[in-house]
Amino acid sequence: MLSSIIDAFKVPELRKKILFTLAILALYRFGAYVPVPGIPFHDFATSFQDTGVAMTMLDLFTGGALSNFSVFSLGIMPYITASIIMQLMQGVIPAVGRWAREGDSGRRKITQVTRYLTLGLGLINAIGYLLLFQSPAYGVAFSNELPVWLTNVVIVFTLVAGTAFIMWMGELITQRGIGNGMSLIIFVSIVSRVPSAIFSSINLTSDLGMGIAVTALILVVVLACIPAIIYVERAQRRIPVNYAKRVQGRKMMGGQSTYIPLKVNAAGVIPIIFASCIIYFPAQLAAIFNVEWLTVVANACSTGWVNWILTLVLIVFFAYFYTSMVFNPQETADNIKKQGGFIPGVRPGAATVQYIKDVINRITLPGGIFIAVIAVVPTIIFFFTDNQLIQSFGGTSILIMIGVALDTMSKVESQLKMHNYNGFFK
């Protein structure tokens, strides 16, 4: 591993991408501690300590930016919500579906609409947070140096601008850095909360020795789960494909065998991110409207048996949904047929399409259930222990971190192999 990292920095182009990515992520973390103008920092931090579970989880995905009421308080959630909406619209609105099939030009249109939608959602969230924190539940008094309306405008504008800036940084990392920018931002947000969660876990009980022992046990269990998670993340179901021999001019073509690699978890961490966004959407609505019954619903969706069932169902659903979006059995079957290939024992055409669909359905279910269980079990343990380390370094967090890390390492590995270096995966 260390030699691979050293090799990565030996390649000038790759070194620039890695340093650029680290610089953008450092800028993001700096912004998480820059408070919005007019915010009484100490009073707000004191009020936020008594917040509900839903707001605590939203704060986790912003890397503490929300509890600081910083310029990045809205985090990446508006963009993720907008992305989910656009993914769903591809199957509902024919025009958006055509854009998805048009290649680069269509993707640019979808990206542009996603940006505008992100800003719209960010504006709604910003107004909601402003009203929530000014309500009796928090009772935060903002600066009175300016007229109230002007202070409110500045706060809302700053929050929306922060969302736009996060979106811009994520796209910069994707275009000029290493890995998926939005995923890396979520990764850094989660990792940044781990040190404070470790200290909180150690000091959870009055017995320091017991706190250290419990914390060490949690870390050992997490480390033990990592190989199993990586195994499932990299597991494949290979469908064999044979190519018949044919004569083209004076050359004999075909006669080879290959396979179609289908990942058990083809959607990666997307189902977890999408499911988390949907589950904590009521918390965002509660922040906007500040209605008591909506707050009760938000807290119910954020913890307890309702949260556990929703998480299981939504992760499995999005595993199927996203896999169907990124893998087209019809297109794959057509390409095999055009190249003179066939799956042994399966007739070309409709039978091949159905066979590929059946295989995808069979392997997606266990993959989706596995990541759903990994995400839910630590949440159940946290519910009964109230250990912050389990919440911050629990199933959802660790799956996101491992998934993003593997994806980023795969991209670095491809760059290393282009320059004749060994990659991370031996």
Image (spheres, grey):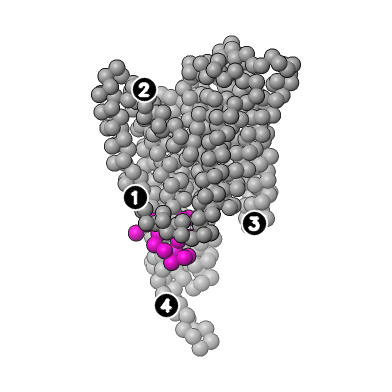
Q: Earlier in the sequence, mark 1 or mark 2?
A: 1
Up-down relation of residue 402 to residue 154 (above or below): below
Q: Earlier in the sequence, mark 3 or mark 2?
A: 3
Element at badge 4?
loop
Count of marks overlaid on the render: 4
Foreground mark, 4 or 2, reads 2
Looking at numbered disc 4 in the image, what kind of residue is underneath it? Gly
Which residue is depicted at the point 43% across and 67% down?
Answer: 420
Label 1 neighbour load within 10 Å: few <14, some 14-19, many 20+: few
Which residue is depicted at the point 47% across and 50% down?
Answer: 408
Q: Position of residue 180 (x, y in %)?
A: 53, 48
Q: CA distance from mark 4 to mark 2?
A: 61 Å
Looking at numbered disc 3 in the image, what kind of residue is underneath it? Asp
Decide which of 208, 253 is in the foreground and name it: 208
Foreground mark, 1 or 4, reads 1
What is the span of residues highlighted in magenta in the rendered image? 411-426
Foreground mark, 1 or 2, reads 2
**Badge 3 is on which residue?**
104
Disc number for residue 255: 4
Looking at numbered disc 2 in the image, what kind of residue is underneath it? Asp
Up-down relation of residue 347 to residue 93 (above or below): below
Element at badge 1?
helix
Q: CA distance from mark 1 to mark 3?
A: 33 Å
**Badge 2 is on which residue?**
386
Disc number for residue 231: 1
Q: Earlier in the sequence, mark 3 or mark 4?
A: 3
